Image (cartoon, rainbow, N blue to C red):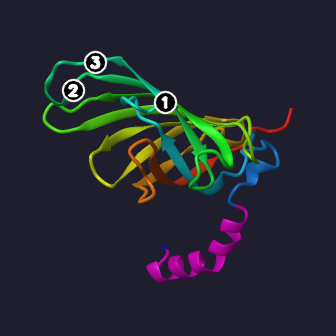
Amino acid sequence: MTTPSRTLIFLFVFLPAILAKGNILEDILPNPCKCCQENETRLHMYLHQFPHLPGVTNRNEYTMVSSPEPIGFGTMIVHDWVLTTGLSATENVVGRLQGFHLQAGQATTSWYTAHTIVFRDGSFAGSTLEVSGITEVKPNGEWSITGGTAAFASAHGTIKFINSQSSTATDAIKELDIHVFHTPEPAV
């Protein structure tokens, strides 16, 4: 009969050899899934919202459903916001945020926002990110990234935003810190 001490000695002596040969069958049955390495990308950009208000001539959103409810509960606005790498809405335009936002809060202003970031210029041209989340009347917030295409295939992550002090009544600017994990599609 083996004593516990001999069993422990055996394990300590032979465990490294056992672990080194841990997957003996890999030579016979190779793993068919050779998954791509997930990449991490961080971007700092600016969103420019030209609101659907009287006097705003270059608006990039339009009210589709207006609500008589208190604080506009149920109001839906379609948007095509501008995405830039700088504070100016006309310089370094790299894409658009196309989607909608609707007033989902009955007691507080709380906009549910869903849009696709469509990259048109720069190193991510032709790629997209799917984004959704809540925008409240606070100076900052966070949206989730739930998908993407091309360079951002299988994307997930977050976008943290803060209202820029450079905002005006006709150009509501949000500073975006985009943190995305993605597995680029292989070249065909």
Residue 158 lies in the magenta stretch: no
- The secondary structure making up most of the magenta span is helix
Q: Residue at x 66, y 51 (%)?
A: 38
Q: Residues within 10 Å of mark 2 (few under 14, many from 20)?
A: some
Amino acid at circle 1: Thr
Q: Are marks 3 and 2 in contact (CB under 8 Å)?
A: yes
Secondary structure type for disc 3: loop
Q: Earlier in the sequence, mark 1 or mark 2?
A: 1
Task: Measuring from the top left, give residue 75's x and y in whole percent.
Answer: 28, 23
Horizontally, residue 184 falls left or right of residue 77, namely right
Give the quadrant of residue 150.
Answer: top right
Amino acid at circle 2: Gly
**Range of magenta residues:** 2-21
Q: Quadrant of the C terminus?
A: top right
Looking at this view, name the residue that lies furthest to the right: 188
Residue hosting label 2: 72
